[in-house]
Amino acid sequence: MVSSDFVRQAEGYGLTTANILYRLPDHPVILQEYVWQQYDLAPQFPELHRFLAFWEKSLDGRLHSVRVAHKRLISPSEFKSVQKEYWLH
């Protein structure tokens, strides 16, 4: 059984990390950091955009900035399907 994370990586998803700085609701001059990590598609980042929309709709801490890093863990040249039969004696 192939893991769902591996399937997503083979479909082009890569590991995306976002450093999110936001203002504390009771002390808006103070910034707090939140680190978000998920498999996402660059450069559109649909998962990150969904998360940030949720944040702005549901959470009190106003966003200050978002810094994004993305790494494809499997690229087409590194992934090759091998179909062989192995017999163990």
Image: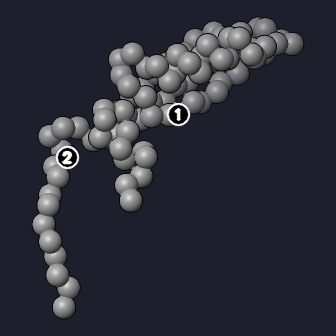
Q: Nearer the viewer, residue 77 or 5?
A: 5
- Which comes before the other along the chain, label 1 or label 2? 1
Left or right, 87 with reference to 41: left
Using the image, determine if residue 22 lies above or below residue 72.
Answer: above
34 and 86: which is toward the camera: 86
Q: Residue at x 19, y 91 (%)?
A: 89
Q: Residue 34, how many percent across, how many down?
A: 64, 27
The amino acid marked with disc number 1 is Gln
Q: Write the residue at 14% across / 40% down.
A: 77
Give the amino acid type for the residue marked by disc 2 in the picture. Phe
Helix, strand or loop at label 2? It is loop
Q: Which residue is mark 1?
A: 37
Task: Identify the secondary structure beneath mark 1.
Answer: strand
Image spot of residue 13 (x, y percent) = 36, 33
Closer mark to the observer between disc 1 and disc 2 = 2
The reply to whether residue 72 is in sight is no
Q: Position of residue 45 (x, y in %)?
A: 43, 20
Residue 79 vertical position relative to residue 37 in the rendered view, above or below: below
Q: Mark 2 highlights which residue?
A: 79
Whether residue 56 sits left or right of residue 75 in the image: it is: right
Residue 52 appears at what percent x and percent y? 60, 16
